[in-house]
Amino acid sequence: MNFLKHIDRNAERWLLLVFYVMLVVTMAVEVLRRELFSYSSIWGEEIVRYSFIYLAWIGAAAAVKERAHIRIDVLLHYLGPKPKALVYIFGDLVMFIVALVALFWSVETVLVSAKFGSVTDGLRISKVWFLAAVPVGFSLMIFRLVQSFLRDFRSLRDGTPVYEGDKLFD
């Protein structure tokens, strides 16, 4: 059970670290190859591109978990704990619906790519692995939104302040 809590707490962080390191190392190697040997590979650019795509979608899920997405919360400062929780629940509900629709259509794209067997230009591997970044990201978002609903309903029931994430500016 402790292992599952660790994964729940740090899954996005570790995935973001892996993709970020892969992006930076590949980019550095490609720059050195280009400058020192006047040679670069097509696969290096693809690895950087697809690592960045995974970074974006996993980062979006991490931002949902931490309530770090950009929001205008001036009016929320004047609300009590229960109305504030209701506003957050409503916002998460809207995001949940959008994520479900986007998940459906992104899975459709992956299935079409798998059906026709499209491959990347440089790596010559199935594009399914890279197109899957979008449904993976939306699935993680949906999972984190469900956790957020449970946390907010608990705050609403108990009358405790709702989780607002870390403040960037005060």
Image (cartoon, rainbow, N blue to C red):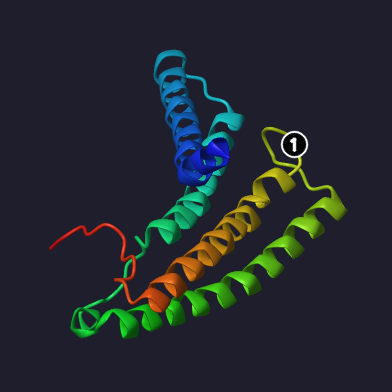
Q: Residue at x 51, y 80 (%)?
A: 94
Element carrying mark 1: loop
Q: Is residue 140 left or right of residue 63?
A: right
Q: Nearer the viewer, residue 57 or 79?
A: 79
Whether residue 122 is situated above or below residue 34 in the rendered picture: below
Residue, far right = 115
Q: Nearer the viewer, residue 154 or 79?
A: 154
Residue 48 image offset from top left, x and y in percent:
51, 37
Q: Residue at x 80, y 58 (%)?
A: 111
Whether residue 147 is situated above or below residue 117 in the rendered picture: below
Residue 131 image offset from top left, x and y in percent:
67, 51
Q: Quadrant of the C terminus?
A: bottom left
Whether residue 28 is situated above or below residue 19 in the rendered picture: above
What residue does disc 1 label?
A: 125
Q: Quadrant of the N terminus?
A: top right
Q: Is residue 94 left or right of residue 100?
A: left
Q: Nearer the viewer, residue 98 or 36?
A: 98
Q: Residue at x 51, y 62 (%)?
A: 147
Q: Amino acid at mark 1?
A: Ile
Residue, far left = 170
Other-residue count near label 1 (Cα within 10 Å), few / some / many at <14 / 14–19 / ≥20: few
Q: Is residue 165 left or right of residue 77?
A: right
